[in-house]
């Protein structure tokens, strides 16, 4: 009866009533638009800004097919004599974005082009910093529905004009049996300085339309005309002394239809109304069997868990059966009770992907009705969450202050469940398990792209947008309803002659909304969509430049509105891309030639033999440093016991021989030995070169001794010369990692505890934000071969700062060491996405892909290290990449998955098979840090940056002083004895307070040979000058 009375009411009365409700709700005004700037042209946080007043404003509102396009043109004036930079922040309605942006250049409105958000910022700030006289402007999304535009230069006493365009859907307000009533609230400010203001409203023919202008009080006025000017606004505002302009509300009534189709040439829309007769009701007394997954990862909070605990108790009290599993990066093997939730401890990373796998497997035997997921939704471990298909509905609940709304909404919609934000919603237990009317699936022929294409709830209505490349008619099928009670709607689409720019923009916005859910997976496609449709995305901004030189300088394609610039730019870009490929190929050939001469011919093919020299006398052509140093060495050597003379023994003579050869090597590097003193800007002093040094009387040169102080060992050949036994006994062919012994207080407590993991959880309360705490504790458990516990501890770091490349790299190295290659691969992909400018990002990923037997991707990724252009501080990393690229091919052959350079389109000049008996590589986590690799050979000769080629052929690569490495030691032919490997923290060049770093060392015996052995270890280095013995590698 009530519904019948409602439908009999006059449509004008309904519109009037609904208009009053909306205006009362939306009456709060927005901040007056002020273009802020400062006189220097660069805006500083502590400097008072000067407003650039708005002189004119023109707003055009176009409404068609339930869609609203708003174009605002604002004119600002700089009344000062200075050249200024302007910045304007503005709010938009929820779900609205900027779809077009323009800047006046010499009287013409030039359209913006999309670029990455970071690139737009860099270009703008570069132009400002260089005090460019050319125009530049950007607009970007700051956060949520807040946007910002920046423009430069605004010369003194001059005007600047900008255009901002947005598109959104009309809001469904009310429905009767005959009418669909929709509304649009357009917030508008009335700047006090404005001289001219005009609002034009264009609406397609409707049955009923009402336009109302309102202030921020209850005063509003119906406008009968479609053009509103400043006089109309001021007349209304004159009715109240306190009121300020709030906005304009447009309410329309159209004939109610279950579906409405907008046909066009390429872009089309299908509007589907919710069928109220299909509402599904659940029986209140029906008991359910529910599986519950509760997130216990590091990022969770006690307060949120307590709130979620109460919700679960309410659900259980209704008689439902709950099976509760805690999870972090893994799902717990055993269930817990509801009351046990309060005892949960938060630890590890987050993998909802593993939860869905576990749920699907359990549902096969347990026959659950649905699942409840309690989490903040931040997936730190996993790559395929969006490809997972839940077997039962999932209802996600979160009481955390920070939540991943997009992912949790996606999971709820895709599974047929729901997502409930417990911080904004009460009585959630009453909604759980109730299925909601949804769009379930969309089917379209090849050549037709539809959005949304994933499940989504229908609240009142839903609009499906399509883009077709087909010239003939086609059908789109849509499943709506409930997972177990659905209906299929079929729509016949016929392309027309003309396209709709409005529908095209909305199609792009819906595509961006959907792809944005998937994180970084579709970054490239999002960027291309933004470029094609000239709209802002969360990762893109719009930019306007004035000259071709600017577009060329920053590699940005001019807009279509500048056809002459675009044509010239495209012609040059074609040549640029061609030259880039040529440069890539040329670099590969050049690097390979250098590798051939500097690594292969001059070292690898050379034969090294350890031949002790005959004893020398004191007579030298060169005196001074060399003579003084040798005199110092002789003075501490034992003389022969068989003679009363001061002649050295043969063992001591061998020491002198080695010392002479070292000095000779250094003299070859620099005639005056000053080259050694200043090599790589490292000033050698008594404490820096090694543990014990021998210096001449003038202390002008300090080098490490060729042998240990007590002369316990010399090479086997020297010992044989003396007629004695070999100094080193045969040893087992294993790599012996030196245990790491941390002196940190929490580690001392941990080691003394009977239950180390329990001790860790207790200590975590004091160190929960410290990366080094998790690194050292994880290392302890890994050293104890308790890898699962170690990985759990380690993954806490992923929840501290999700995009910190140094932390991610450390986690990746630790996982690599623990042979958790799949997890390591996920981490290194993240590192590459945030640090693509570093060749080490490619190298790390390639090496772990090799361990996963993904040889093709590993090889092509490593090939990028060789051919791409890098900063000069990374010089010669290509040599390491060539060697490792060949090792990838060697591994593929050994795994019977052989790949070839030809099949991968890799230049065959990179082919170098270089098996060797020993190879040690070292890299580290922190950029701009100098870590040195030291290897002491069985002869006691030390190979390091200051002595990079030894008598037995030990070769050390380039010293990386400002990067992440790598440094590598190579030895083609082993000798008997022990090789000791150390890492030394030489210097930190970072402009921050960061202290330590983590090194990853990889040791190979019989590298690229069938009996190859490999070991990996990570170790923390806490500060400058620390030298850590890491490993001993024996050869028998």
Image (cartoon, rainbow, N blue to C red):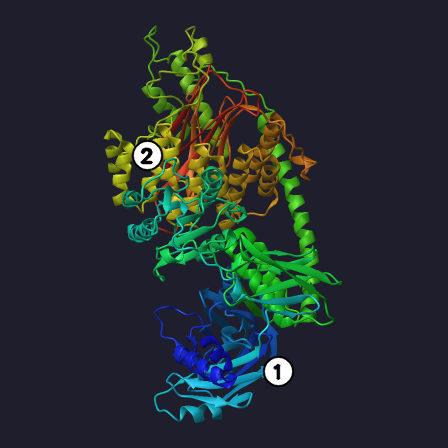
| Residue 76 in sight here | no
- Say which mark, if any, is on residue 687: 2
- For residue 247, which quarter of the picture? bottom left
Element marked by disc 2: loop
- Say which mark, if any, is on residue 205: 1
Relative image position of residue 937 (x, y in whole percent) = 44, 22
Residue occupying the point 44% across, 94% down? 235
Q: As drawn, is 153 to the left or to the right of 345?
A: right
Placement of 732 over or under 286, stated as above or below: above
- Say which mark, if any, is on residue 643: none
- Taking the view exactly as shown, the residue that stands out farthest to the right is 472
Q: Nearer the viewer, residue 296 or 739?
A: 296
Q: As drawn, is 478 to the left or to the right of 769?
A: right
Mark before the other along the chain sequence, 1 or 2: 1
Mark 1 burial class by Cα count in 10 Å: few <14, some 14-19, many 20+:
few
Residue occupying the point 49% across, 17% down? 975
Q: Nearer the viewer, residue 594 or 770?
A: 770
Relative image position of residue 963 (x, y in whole percent) = 46, 44
3D distance between C-alphas at marks 1 and 2: 87 Å
| Residue 315 in sight here | yes
Placement of 287 over or under 157, stated as above or below: above
Q: Nearer the viewer, residue 218 or 347?
A: 218
- Tags 1 and 2 touching, CB below 8 Å: no
């Amino acid at each position: 009866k009530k519904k019948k009375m409602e439908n009999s009411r006059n449509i004008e009365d309904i519109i009037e009533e609904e208009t009053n409700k909306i205006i009362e709700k939306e009456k709060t005004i927005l901040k007056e638009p002020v273009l802020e700037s400062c006189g220097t042209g660069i805006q500083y946080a502590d400097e008072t800004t000067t407003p650039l007043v708005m002189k004119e404003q023109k707003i055009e509102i176009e409404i068609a097919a339930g869609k609203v396009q708003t174009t605002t043109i604002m004119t600002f004036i700089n009344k000062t004599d200075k050249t200024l930079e302007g910045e304007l922040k503005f709010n938009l309605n929820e779900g609205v974005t900027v779809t077009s942006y323009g800047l006046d250049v010499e009287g013409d409105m030039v359209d913006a082009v999309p670029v990455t958000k970071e690139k737009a910022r860099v270009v703008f700030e570069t132009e400002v910093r260089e005090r460019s006289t050319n125009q530049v402007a950007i607009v970007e999304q700051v956060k949520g529905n807040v946007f910002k535009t920046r423009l430069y230069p605004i010369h003194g006493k001059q005007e600047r004009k900008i255009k901002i365009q947005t598109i959104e859907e009309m809001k469904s307000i009310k429905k009767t049996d005959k009418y669909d009533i929709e509304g649009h609230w357009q917030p508008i400010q009335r700047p006090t300085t404005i001289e001219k203001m005009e609002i034009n409203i264009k609406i397609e023919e409707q049955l009923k339309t009402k336009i109302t202008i309102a202030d921020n009080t209850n005063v509003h006025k119906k406008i009968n005309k479609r053009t509103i000017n400043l006089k109309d606004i001021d007349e209304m505002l004159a009715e109240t002394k306190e009121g300020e302009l709030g906005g304009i509300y447009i309410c329309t009534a159209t004939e109610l239809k279950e579906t409405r189709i907008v046909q066009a040439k390429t872009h089309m829309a299908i509007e589907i109304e919710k069928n109220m007769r299909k509402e599904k009701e659940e029986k209140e007394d029906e008991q359910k069997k529910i599986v519950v997954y509760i997130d216990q990862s590091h990022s969770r909070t006690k307060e949120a868990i307590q709130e979620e605990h109460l919700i679960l108790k309410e659900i259980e009290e209704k008689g439902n059966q709950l099976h509760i599993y805690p999870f972090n990066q893994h799902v717990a093997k055993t269930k817990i009770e509801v009351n046990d939730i309060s005892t949960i401890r938060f630890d590890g990373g987050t993998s909802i992907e593993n939860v869905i796998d576990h749920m699907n497997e359990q549902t096969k035997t347990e026959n659950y009705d649905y699942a409840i997921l309690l989490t903040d939704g931040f997936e730190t471990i996993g790559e395929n969450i969006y490809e997972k298909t839940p077997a039962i509905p999932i209802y996600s609940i979160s009481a955390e202050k920070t939540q991943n709304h997009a992912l949790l909404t996606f999971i709820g919609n895709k599974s047929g469940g729901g997502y409930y934000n417990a911080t904004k919603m009460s009585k959630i237990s009453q909604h759980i398990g109730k299925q909601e009317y949804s769009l379930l699936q969309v089917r379209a022929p090849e050549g037709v792209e539809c959005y949304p294409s994933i499940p989504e709830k229908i609240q009142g209505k839903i609009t499906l947008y399509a883009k077709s490349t087909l010239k003939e008619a086609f059908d789109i099928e849509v499943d709506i309803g409930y997972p177990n009670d659905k209906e299929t709607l079929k729509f016949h689409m016929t392309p027309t002659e003309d396209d709709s720019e409005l529908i095209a923009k909305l199609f792009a916005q819906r595509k961006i909304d959907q792809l944005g859910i998937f994180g970084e997976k579709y970054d490239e496609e999002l960027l291309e969509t933004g470029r094609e449709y000239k709209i802002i995305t969360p990762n893109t901004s719009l930019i306007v430049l004035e000259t071709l030189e600017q577009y060329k300088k920053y590699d940005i394609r001019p807009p279509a509105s500048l056809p002459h610039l675009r044509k010239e730019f495209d012609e040059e870009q074609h040549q640029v891309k061609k030259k880039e490929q040529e440069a890539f190929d040329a670099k590969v050939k050049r690097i390979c030639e250098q590798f051939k001469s500097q690594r292969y011919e001059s070292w690898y093919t050379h034969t090294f033999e350890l031949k002790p020299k005959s004893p020398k006398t004191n007579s030298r052509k060169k005196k001074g440093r060399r003579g003084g140093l040798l005199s110092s060495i002789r003075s501490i050597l034992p003389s022969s016991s068989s003679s009363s003379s001061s002649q050295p023994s043969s063992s001591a003579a061998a020491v002198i021989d080695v010392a002479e050869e070292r000095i000779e090597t250094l003299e070859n590097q620099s005639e005056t030995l000053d080259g050694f003193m200043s090599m790589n800007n490292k000033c050698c002093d008594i404490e820096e070169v090694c543990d014990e040094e021998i210096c001449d009387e003038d202390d002008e040169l300090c080098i490490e001794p060729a042998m240990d102080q007590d002369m316990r060992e010399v090479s086997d050949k020297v010992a044989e010369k003396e007629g004695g036994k070999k100094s080193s006994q045969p040893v087992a062919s294993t790599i012996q990692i030196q245990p790491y012994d941390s002196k940190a207080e929490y580690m001392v407590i941990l080691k003394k505890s009977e239950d180390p993991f329990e001790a860790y959880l207790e200590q975590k309360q004091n160190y929960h934000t410290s990366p080094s705490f998790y690194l050292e504790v994880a290392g302890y458990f890994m050293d104890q071969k308790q890898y699962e516990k170690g990985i759990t501890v380690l993954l806490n770091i992923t929840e501290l700062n999700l995009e910190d490349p140094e932390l991610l790299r450390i986690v990746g190295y630790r996982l690599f060491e623990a042979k958790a290659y799949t997890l390591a691969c996920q981490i290194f992909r993240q590192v590459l996405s945030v640090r693509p400018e570093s060749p080490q990002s490619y190298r790390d990923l390639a090496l772990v892909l090799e361990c996963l037997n993904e040889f093709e991707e590993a090889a092509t990724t490593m090939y990028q290290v060789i051919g791409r252009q890098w900063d000069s501080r990374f010089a010669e990393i290509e040599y390491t990449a060539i060697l490792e690229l060949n090792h990838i091919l060697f591994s593929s052959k050994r795994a019977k998955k052989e790949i070839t350079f030809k099949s991968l389109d890799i230049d065959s000049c990179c082919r170098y098979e270089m098996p060797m008996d020993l190879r040690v590589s070292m890299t580290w986590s922190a950029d701009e840090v100098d870590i040195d690799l030291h290897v002491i050979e069985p002869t006691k000769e030390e190979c390091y940056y200051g002595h990079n080629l030894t008598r037995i052929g030990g070769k050390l690569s380039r010293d990386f002083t400002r990067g992440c490495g790598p440094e590598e030691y190579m030895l083609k032919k082993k000798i008997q004895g022990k090789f000791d490997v150390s890492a030394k923290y030489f210097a930190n060049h970072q402009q921050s307070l960061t202290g330590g770093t983590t090194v990853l060392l990889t040791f190979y015996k019989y590298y690229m040979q069938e009996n190859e052995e490999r070991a990996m270890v990570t170790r923390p280095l806490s500060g400058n000058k620390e030298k850590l013995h890491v490993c001993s590698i024996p050869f028998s």
